[in-house]
Amino acid sequence: MSLAAVAGFMSVEALFIAAVLILVEVTFSFENAIINAKVLSGVSVFWRKIFITIGILIAVVGMRLVFPIVIVAVTAGLPMPAVVDLALNNPERYAHELHDAHIPIAAFGGMFLLMLCLHFFLDSSRKIHWINIIEKPLQSMSRWWLYTAISLVVLIILTLLPMNPSPQETLTAGLVGIATYIIIHGLAELFARRQNVGKHANVLKTGMAGFMSFLYLEVLDASFSFDSVIGAFAVTKDVVLIAIGLGIGAIWVRSLTIFMVEHQVLHAYRFLEHGAHYTIGVLSVVLLAGIFYNVPEIIAGVIGIGIITASIVSSIRINRAKHA
């Protein structure tokens, strides 16, 4: 319906641009759907409904439309009405201001995703391995504090590099990214333990445990959406088209998440979650490298699709071998 409205009220060219933006969003967020499915499979039906209703509203309106305006307002020191006016009437300058905010965005998102990636591969309780030569040595080093320590060391190195154009912004935003992951993930685990989730496999998270999981998913979506929002301005400067295209893509990703949960896709494809976390690692590196260099956002998307495809193929092969 949204695409029909674009074609009817704007133009066929606008329809094509919106379709490209949908593809951009899906490319950047496919691994997001996989991680979402992992988290969402452990929460109650109520929180799954919240995710697909209120969560979609936050993803489409909040993260793809309002959040970039807030970022520009904070980093450029402009009042919100002035930024809205820029977005609607001077999209070139709006895109420029948003691009200037790339360093704190990259530092926050890069460190948050790095924490997520390292936490997965350093988890001593994980029993399934995909690429043994990488995953088994990492798991053997597992300590509860190690993934945070590694992330802090990486952040300090990035901050102290002489070619860093904004070390203070890098350090501050990176610390906020690390702290956000620790707080939200830690609270989610705390409330889950209080509810005895984990001791009983059939217990789903409700109440505050479910809420913290929902909040974690929203922050995760924010980390994934940074590159797609900034990359969208390479396609068009029309913020309305960007909101429509990325919004439809975000809805598709949410629908894919629910499909994965209901059809237990992560159980059928045992290495899919591994592929998603390798992709998250790549996206983290691309975001952090973007502090220093102009890295094309499409690189992370293309590599991610390749890794996830490989994980699906590997899952199919091992399933066939088991049933042979």
Image (cartoon, helix red, strand yellow):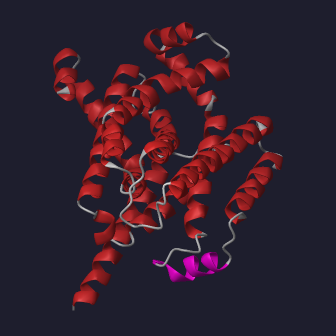
Compared to residue 18, the image places residue 7 above or below, namely: above
- Horizontally, residue 245 falls left or right of residue 31, namely left
Residue 57 appears in the picture as rendered: yes
> What range is drawn magenta here?
128-140
The quadrant the C terminus occupies is bottom left
Depth order, front residue of 184/191: 191
Q: Which residue: 70% across, 56% down?
A: 151
The quadrant the N terminus occupies is top left
Which percent across, then down, holds residue 319? 28, 81
Depth order, front residue of 225/268: 268
Which percent across, then down, holds residue 150? 72, 61
Residue 20 appears in the picture as rendered: no
Which percent across, then down, holds residue 166? 76, 36
Q: Is residue 118 magenta?
A: no
Q: Quadrant of residue 320?
A: bottom left
Compared to residue 187, the image places residue 86 above or below, namely: above
Which percent across, then down, holds residue 255? 27, 45
Depth order, front residue of 211/153: 211
Compared to residue 294, the image places residue 315 above or below, namely: below
Most extreme residue toward the bottom is 324
- Horizontally, residue 40 falls left or right of residue 86, namely left
Q: Which residue: 44% across, 61% down?
A: 276
- Horizontally, residue 221 falls left or right of residue 139, namely left
